[in-house]
């Protein structure tokens, strides 16, 4: 491909580049870069780098800078950007360099001497990275729309992806919405040479590792040290610095830690969704408890004024396909508010539930080890925790003790009694012939978790951390926030913290005083009592229902009653009609709401594809950072 074609691909992504746009070519390689500067040293190097040996670009934040400087023998008084550190690491360690990096990154190096392209994505999949390859071309980009802009990619819809999306199984690590395009999985590197493309996993979680520190205090101290550094490293950049603040344990922990350890005078900006018309969803009392504890400048964003289809065109364009985030319409307003305050760095308390883990499988461990008195106390406590809804003691025993410990013969009998676990039979919205044609049952069976059933807390925790849902959520947040010139950063998805939490004994996760007890103990001096002792969490289900059926009622009707041709053949029309009738005449279940939302998303996306609107940007700001490459022979 020519330099002009690289420029055209880069132009598709100009919403990601408020601080500079550049393209460079070297031999058969061409790189484009859109720059968003969020770290102090970012302006010391223009990307892509083009020197005697390398063509290089990245979207990166490196957290172990001091360690790398020492290992790479870079003088202490020389200013060096994260990009320079990555390139120096590649120059020293070659394809093993990602093992030495800590942070969030996606980068590419064209090594002209070796005639080799190398690219890698960070451990947790925070930075998006997609690619296309055939016999003559390898191309990659931060967003798929840059790839879809080229005539050699026809943008054929991936019907397998549509099938898994319809039944809510949205955890593919490599598949995308398009047949010819793939994502680079987290913790993965790729090497491209003239006649080969290879993929290597450079890091994996170890589910067999267990920490033994000797006391609750030792676990607490080490958790706090790691968590504080995870937050501090993500605050690197010029203030103002922002955090989300929902009032839950996760976002409150991030916000309070950020305020406690900040090294600048300016207050930390907090951005909170509030629900004045839906008190059951509103957590303002907990938000205000946090605000009273630190140096914050607060911003409230209404979460109940729009619906999940309100910004559907914009979010579909950012996501490059159907997405799983039913609450992204609220976060879109939040990101817009962040940008309006000239905040570029936003810390998010995303999914501490999975990273730290509630530890409920500890109950099964107590039962299997015969510690019945401790089990009785733990079950009683668990029945009183308000994690979305209270469970009876009988329900707790069945879900967290009997089910995981039951022999396979008993589990099989129970499945037959309940009608089996056939994903197609249990999701009547999908056309059965279509499901058979794409092999839906087999795909879902093949993607089963490593530990099934998970009989210990660590096995369950590992399964949570290894599914493909989290990277997809981080990707979506990155792309929607990036549309507004905001870089979201996720302290809970720090490699060190994830490894530490998985290796914790189950007793450091579940406790009669609350789940995720190691987090509560570690931050007890900076969290308000109302947050530290909180064992409930507000549900956004009612807001989703009201938003879809009332605020977006007309749009929902238009989208689900006039389906585009490809989608019509994939859906069981009689079941869709039944769900629509249920939504009109009675209180629909959450499963029915999710069905209607998925059908509406697919309907709009497929209509856009038919009308060739895939690369047409919606009106709005043009900001943030990207890179793309073509290597052709």
Image: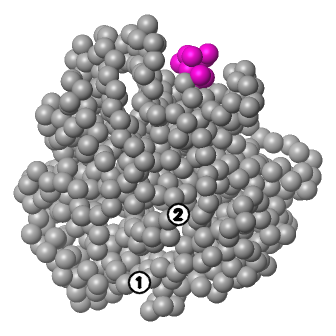
| Side of 157 where 307 appears, left or right | right
Distance of label 2 from label 1 (alpha carbons): 24 Å
Question: Mark 2 or mark 1: which is in front?
Answer: 2
81 with respect to 114 (left or right): right
In the image, residue 357 lies in the stretch drawn in magenta: no
Tell me if residue 378 comes above or below residue 11 in the rendering.
Answer: below
Look at the numbered disc 2 and give the secondary structure of its residue: loop
Front-lying residue, 25 or 577: 25
Q: Which residues are magenta?
A: 88-98
Question: Looking at the rendered structure, which numbered label has been put on residue 304?
Answer: 1
Q: Which residue is mark 2?
A: 343
Q: Nearer the viewer, residue 333 or 508?
A: 333
Colour scheme in the image?
Answer: one colour
Label 2: how many Cα within 10 Å (few below 14, some 14–19, many 20+)? many
Residue pictured at 61% horizontal, 52% vertical:
237
Which element type, helix, strand or loop, lies under badge 1?
loop
Q: What is the crowding at mark 1: few (fewer than 14 residues within 10 Å), some, or many (at least 20)?
A: many
| Dot 2 or dot 1, earlier in sequence | 1
Instruction: Tell me the residue at 16%/70% (across/down).
Output: 559
Q: What residue is drawn where x is 24% and y is 89%?
A: 585
Q: Quadrant of residue 508?
A: bottom right
């Amino acid at each position: 491909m020519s330099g002009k074609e690289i420029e055209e691909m880069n132009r598709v992504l100009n919403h990601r580049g408020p601080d500079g746009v550049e393209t460079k070519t070297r031999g058969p390689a061409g790189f484009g870069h859109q720059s968003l500067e969020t770290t102090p040293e970012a302006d010391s190097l223009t990307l892509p780098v083009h020197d005697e040996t390398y063509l290089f670009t990245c979207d990166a934040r490196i957290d172990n800078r001091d360690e790398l400087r020492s290992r790479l023998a870079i003088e202490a008084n020389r200013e060096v950007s994260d990009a320079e550190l990555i390139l120096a690491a590649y120059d020293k360690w070659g394809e093993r360099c990602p093992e030495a990096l800590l942070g969030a990154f996606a980068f590419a190096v064209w090594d002209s001497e070796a005639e080799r392209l190398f690219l890698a994505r960070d451990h947790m999949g925070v930075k998006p990275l997609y690619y296309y390859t055939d016999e003559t071309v390898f191309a990659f980009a931060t967003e798929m729309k840059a790839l879809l802009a080229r005539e050699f990619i026809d943008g054929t819809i991936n019907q397998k992806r549509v099938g898994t999306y319809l039944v809510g199984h949205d955890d593919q690590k490599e598949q995308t919405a398009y047949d010819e395009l793939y994502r680079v999985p987290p913790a993965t590197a790729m090497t491209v040479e003239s006649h080969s493309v290879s993929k290597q996993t450079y890091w994996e979680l170890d589910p067999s590792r267990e920490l033994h520190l000797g006391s609750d205090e030792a676990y607490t101290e080490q958790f706090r040290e790691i968590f504080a550094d995870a937050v501090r490293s993500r605050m690197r950049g010029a203030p103002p610095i922002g955090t989300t603040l929902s009032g839950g344990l996760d976002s409150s922990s991030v916000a309070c830690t950020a305020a406690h350890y900040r090294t600048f005078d300016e207050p930390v900006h907090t951005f909170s969704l509030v629900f004045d018309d839906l008190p059951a969803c509103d957590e303002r009392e907990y938000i205000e408890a946090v605000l009273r504890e630190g140096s914050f400048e607060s911003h409230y964003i209404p979460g109940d004024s729009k619906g999940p289809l309100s910004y559907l065109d914009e979010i579909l364009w950012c996501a490059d396909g159907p997405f799983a985030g039913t609450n992204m319409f609220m976060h879109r307003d939040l990101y817009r508010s962040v940008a309006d305050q000239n905040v570029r760095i936003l810390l998010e308390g995303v999914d501490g539930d999975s990273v730290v883990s509630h530890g409920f499988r500890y109950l099964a461990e107590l039962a299997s080890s015969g510690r019945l008195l401790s089990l009785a106390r733990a079950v009683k406590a668990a029945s009183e925790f308000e994690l979305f809804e209270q469970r009876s003691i009988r329900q707790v025993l069945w879900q967290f003790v009997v089910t995981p410990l039951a022999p396979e013969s008993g589990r099989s009998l129970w499945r037959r009694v309940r009608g089996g676990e056939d994903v197609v039979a249990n999701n009547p919205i999908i056309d059965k012939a279509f499901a058979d044609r794409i092999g839906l049952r087999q795909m879902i069976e093949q993607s089963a978790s490593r530990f099934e059933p998970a009989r210990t807390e660590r096995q369950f925790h590992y399964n949570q951390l290894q599914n493909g849902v989290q990277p997809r959520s981080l990707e979506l947040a990155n792309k929607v926030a990036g549309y507004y010139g905001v870089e979201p950063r996720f302290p809970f998805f720090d490699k060190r913290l994830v490894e530490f939490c998985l290796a914790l004994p189950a007793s450091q996760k579940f406790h009669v005083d609350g789940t995720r007890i190691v987090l509560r103990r570690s931050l007890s001096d900076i969290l308000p009592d109302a947050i530290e002792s909180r064992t409930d969490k507000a549900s956004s289900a009612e807001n989703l229902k009201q938003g879809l059926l009332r605020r977006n009622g007309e749009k929902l009707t238009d989208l689900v009653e006039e389906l585009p041709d490809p989608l019509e053949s994939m859906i069981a029309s009689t079941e869709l009609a039944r769900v629509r009738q249920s939504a009109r005449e009675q209180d629909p279940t959450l499963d029915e709401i999710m069905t209607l939302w998925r059908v509406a998303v697919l309907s709009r996306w497929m209509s856009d594809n038919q009308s060739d609107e895939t690369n047409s940007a919606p009106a709005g700001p043009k900001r943030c950072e990207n890179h793309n490459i073509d290597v052709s022979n």
